[in-house]
Amino acid sequence: MIALVDRALSLNPGFARGWHASGGIRLIAGQPDMAIEHVERSLRLSPRARVGWGLQLIGIAHFAAARFEKAIPQLLLGIQEDPNFATSYRYLAASYGHLGRLAEAGETVGRLRAIIPWIGMDSLLRNPQQHELYVSGLRLATGEG
């Protein structure tokens, strides 16, 4: 997938949707800094017509790099953009959990449960250390950790 999207972007470097897709793929592949770079480029190329959950991806990428303080504002902005996207709440709760901000983590878990009845420990992060960071953060947020 990375090779295909790289090829598309080499043919059309102004393809905002391609940069967004590349950012998502890079995040899944465990490359959070490159994911942020690519999603930010997508947002610059298409500032009015959003092509996906860019702010959420940037927040999740900061989370994957253990930059929880940077993840939180991006995830909060993403939630403002799409308040029904449960994934943003999961990573926000996990970020609060890792920072020891358990009251905010609990409030976020409550908002998540209002959207869907289960928390869900599945993650789009395929890197084992990043996935464990996610799971441990959610456990802290739900009081299981």
Image: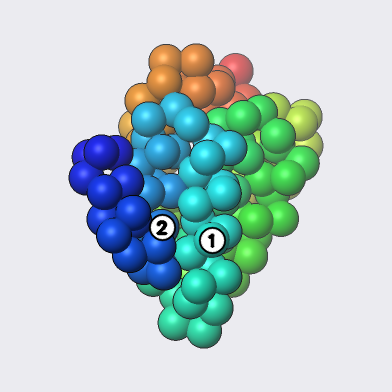
Amino acid type shown at disc 1: Arg
Amino acid type shown at disc 2: Trp
Residue at horizontal 66 percent and vertical 45 percent from the top: 71
Residue 16: quarter of image? bottom left
Q: Which residue is mark 2?
A: 19
Residue 102 visible in rendering = no
- Mark 2 in CB contact with mark 1 (< 8 angstroms): yes
Q: Above or below — where is 81 with respect to 101?
A: below
- Binning the other alpha carbons within 10 Å of mark 1 as few (below 14), some (14 to 19) or many (20 upward) gives some
- Binning the other alpha carbons within 10 Å of mark 2 as few (below 14), some (14 to 19) or many (20 upward) gives many
Residue at horizontal 76 percent and vertical 31 percent from the top: 99
Quadrant of the snapshot with the C terminus? top right
Mark 2 to mark 1 CA distance (whole Å): 7 Å
Q: Camera-side residue: 92 or 140? A: 92
Residue 41 visible in rendering = yes
Q: Position of residue 97 (x, y in %)?
A: 67, 32
Q: Above or below — where is 83 with respect to 67?
A: below
Q: Which mark is residue 2?
A: none
Q: Which mark is residue 41?
A: 1
Residue 77: quarter of image? bottom right
Q: Position of residue 51 (x, y in %)?
A: 39, 71
Residue at horizontal 77 percent and vertical 29 percent from the top: 100
Q: Camera-side residue: 101 or 24? A: 24
Q: Position of residue 59 (x, y in %)?
A: 59, 48
Q: Camera-side residue: 25 or 104? A: 25
Q: Above or below — where is 30 with respect to 85?
A: above
Q: Secondary structure at mark 1?
A: helix
